[in-house]
Amino acid sequence: MSSVPPARSSPPGMATTTSTITPKQTVKISNPIDFVEDPEHVPADANIPDNYVSYTLKHQKALPPVTWDNLLQNLNWLHVGILGLTPLLGFTGAYFTRLRWETAVWAVLYYYMTGLGITAGYHRLWAHRSYNASKTLQYALALFGAGAVQGSIRWWARGHRAHHRYTDTDLDPYNAHKGLLWSHIGWMILKPRRKPGVSDVSDLSKSEVVKWQHRHYLKLVFFMGAIFPTVVAGLGWGDWQGGYVYAGLLRLVFVHHSTFCVNSLAHWLGDTPFDDKHTPRDHLVTALVTIGEGYHNFHHQFPMDYRNAIKWYQYDPTKWFISVCHKLGLASHLKTFPENEVRKGQLTMQLKRLRETQEQLTWPSDDSHLLVINWESYQDQAKTRPLICVAGFIHDVSDFLDEHPGGRHLLTKNIGRDATTAFFGGVYDHSNAAHNLLAMKRVGVLHGGAPHALEDGAIPPSQRLRIARYSELSASGYSSAALSDGEGLMG
C-alpha cells in the first residue's frame, strides 16, 4: 500500500508527438520592486537569492561562542533585568503580602487577558494573519499584548516569522537544536551568535494599530504591565499592594514562561501526528501551560490556520476566544487549512509509523528466493519431509505437527497432497492468523502452481495491504526461479 500513485503510461492509440516549444517573450526585470504592490513598503525578502539559507550560513560569520570568560560581555542586560528582577521582586513581595481571593481571581483573569494578547493577537492575528480583526479588537489585543511585556507587535512578529521560515536552523532565533534552555530563555538573555534570517513584516508597517503600539510601546508597557492591574485591585477592593505583587509582577512571570514554553516545551514534549521533518510536537501539557498553543506540530504544518487544536475536545482557549469574537462580529475571515490536506498529513505519518512496525516483523520468504519444483519432485521429497502444498506454495510443517489445533492427523493426511481446498474452507475455513503462520513455513513453489499463487487466497492477509516506498512500487510480487527438480527444497 502506498500513498504515491504509480506512473501512468499514455492510453493505447494515443500518438506521441513532439513539437518545438515556442519560448515566451522574455520579460526584462529592471527592478525587483516592480512586483511589489506598494513601492513604499518593499518586503525585506523581495530581493534575496534562491539559495539564501545555505549562502547566508556559509558566508555570514558567526560570533565566537559564549564562554565563562566572555559571558558578561555577551549578556543582554535589558532582558536579564526584566526576566531576572520580575520574579525576584514578585516572590519577595509575595512573602510579605497576603493574597486576597479577589486579587487571586483578578491575577488569573489578567493572566489570560494578557496571554490572549500574545496568542490571539501577536501570534495568530499579526504574525500569521490567520483571521481579520475589527479595530476595536485590534486595539484591545495590542494593549493586553503590551501588558505581557514581550516586545512590540512588530518586533515579536518579525522574530516569529523568522522562526517559522528557518525552523531548526542557525537562522532560527530560538533554534530548538541548541537545547531546551536555549529555546526557552537563553536566546533572550544572551546576544545571538548570528543575525536571525530575514523575514518580512512590511504588511505590519501599514497597520495603524501596529504603528501606534510600536510608537508608544514603553508607555504602554509600564501602564498595562504594572499600573493597570494595580489600579484595578486598588480601586476595586482596596488591595493596592496585592494588585501590584500578584496581578502585576507574578502574573507577568507566568505569562512570560507560558509564552516561552511555545518555543521550548512545544519542540520537545509530545508526538508528531502531522509531520516529523522538524521538532514541533503536540501535547496536552504544553497546551495547558500556553493557553492552547501546545498543538505545535499542527501549527507548524498549517501556520495560517486560526486553530491550533482541530478536535473539539482539545484544549485551545485561543481558538475559542477567536470563535466567540467571530460570533460577536469582532473577527472575520477565520482561515482554516483544507481538511483534505490536513488528513493527508495525518495519513502520511500513520503510514510512516506502520512502515516502521512492518519493518520490525518477520515476513515469509520472497517468491524469488524459493525454489521451483514440479509435482513429481514434490511428492518424492514429501516421503522424507512433512511437506504440504497449499495455493501453489510448498510448506514444511515439521515444527507444527504436534501444535496443530485440529490434531496431527489432519496435517499428516495431506502430506504430499494439494491441501488448498481443505485449508480454505473445505475442512475448515482457517483464520487470518493461521494463513499468516502458514506463509512463514514456505520452502518452495510448485511448478505449474504459480497461477494459483497469484490468486487472492494465496496471499496472506498480513501482506494484502503493505506499506511500500515509491522505489518499491515496481517490484513484482512473484518472480520465477530456476527449475530445480532434482534438488532438495532447502538447497
Image: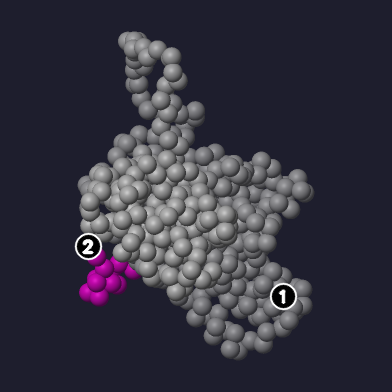
Most extreme residue toward the bottom is 96
Q: CA distance from mark 1 to mark 2?
A: 47 Å
Element on which disc 1 rests: helix
Q: Position of residue 460 (x, y in %)?
A: 47, 54
- Classify residue 11 as left or right of residue 54: right
Q: Amino acid at mark 1?
A: Val
First-in-chain label (1 vs 2): 2
Q: Which residue is mark 2?
A: 64
187, 323: nearer the viewer: 323
Q: Position of residue 449 (x, y in %)?
A: 40, 44
Q: Which residue is mark 1?
A: 105
Taking the image as drawn, is residue 400 in sight?
Answer: yes
The image quadrant that residue 357 belongs to is: bottom left
What colour scheme has been applied to the protein in the rendered image?
A: one colour
257, 443: nearer the viewer: 443
Q: Main secondary structure of the magenta part?
A: loop
Q: Magenta stretch? A: 65-76
Q: Position of residue 231 (x, y in %)?
A: 69, 71
